[in-house]
C-alpha cells in the first residue's frame, strides 16, 4: 500500500500539475484591433511588472519575435499571428501585460 502511494505521489510531482495558460505561449506578429469583437484576446496594459501576467518585449523585426513574450506589432492583418484589443478595465481583460525594454525579461510571470 505504501509503495502504491509513493508511486502515485511521484507521478503527480513529476508531471506538470498545472497547465500554462494559452497566453503564456504568445509570440510573433500581433495586430491591435480597434473593434473588440475582432480580437482574439482582450489585454490590459499594466503600469507595473509585478502585477502583469505576461512581460512583453516589442521587437522591430518579426523574425526576432520567436519566443513567448516577444511581439512584433504590425498593421497588416495577413502578417499577424494573433490579434489583441486593449481594454481600460482590468476585469474585462483575458490577461495583463507589461512592456519591458530588456529582451531577456520577456515571458510569462507564472513560469518564473
Image (cartoon, rainbow, N blue to C red):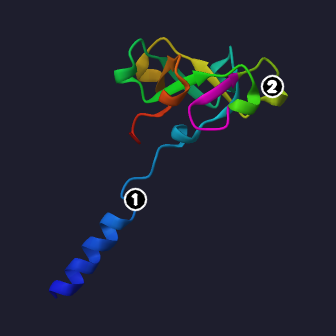
Q: Quadrant of residue 71?
A: top right
Residue in the image at 48% along x and 11% along y: 88
Secondary element at tag 1:
loop
Residue 70 lies in the magenta-colored region: yes
Q: Which residue is mark 2?
A: 77
Instruction: Name the quadrant of the N terminus.
Output: bottom left
Residue closest to the eye, 82 or 25: 25
Q: Which residues are magenta?
A: 65-72
- 43 to the left or right of 51: right
Task: Look at 68% across and 13% down and name the residue there.
Answer: 34
Name the residue that disc number 1 marks: 16
Q: Is residue 94 visible?
A: no
* Image location of residue 20, percent across then percent down: 46, 47
Instruction: Residue 22: give x, y in percent of width and height.
Output: 53, 43
- Relative to 18, say whether 76 is above or below: above
Q: Is residue 82 above or below residue 111?
A: above
Q: Is residue 6 above or below residue 25?
A: below
How busy is the neighbourhood of tag 2: few (under 14 within 10 Å), some, or many (20 plus)?
some
Q: Return the residue found at the far left.
A: 2
> Most prominent secondary structure in the magenta stretch?
loop
Question: Depth check: 96 or 50 in front?
Answer: 50
Residue visible at 46% across and 22% down in the picture: 92
Mark nearer the viewer, 2 or 1 = 1
> Which circle's residue, 2 or 1, is located before the other in the chain?
1
Q: Are marks 2 and 1 in contact (CB under 8 Å)?
A: no
Left or right: residue 57 compared with residue 90: right
Query: Magenta stretch containing residue 19, yes or no?
Result: no
For numbered disc 2, what is the local secondary structure?
helix
Picture layout, residue 104 above or below residue 67 = above
Whole-percent x, y for residue 8 in the image: 28, 76
Amino acid at each position: 500500500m505504501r509503495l502504491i502511494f509513493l508511486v502515485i505521489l511521484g507521478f503527480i510531482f513529476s508531471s506538470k500539475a498545472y497547465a500554462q495558460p494559452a497566453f503564456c505561449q504568445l509570440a510573433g506578429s500581433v495586430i491591435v484591433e480597434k473593434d473588440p469583437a475582432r480580437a482574439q484576446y482582450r489585454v490590459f496594459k499594466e503600469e507595473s511588472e509585478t502585477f502583469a501576467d505576461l512581460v512583453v518585449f516589442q521587437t522591430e523585426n518579426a523574425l526576432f519575435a520567436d519566443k513567448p513574450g516577444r511581439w512584433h506589432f504590425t498593421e497588416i492583418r495577413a502578417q499577424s499571428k494573433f490579434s489583441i484589443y486593449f481594454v481600460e478595465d482590468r476585469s474585462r481583460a483575458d490577461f495583463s501585460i507589461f512592456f519591458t525594454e530588456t529582451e531577456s525579461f520577456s515571458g510569462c510571470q507564472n513560469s518564473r
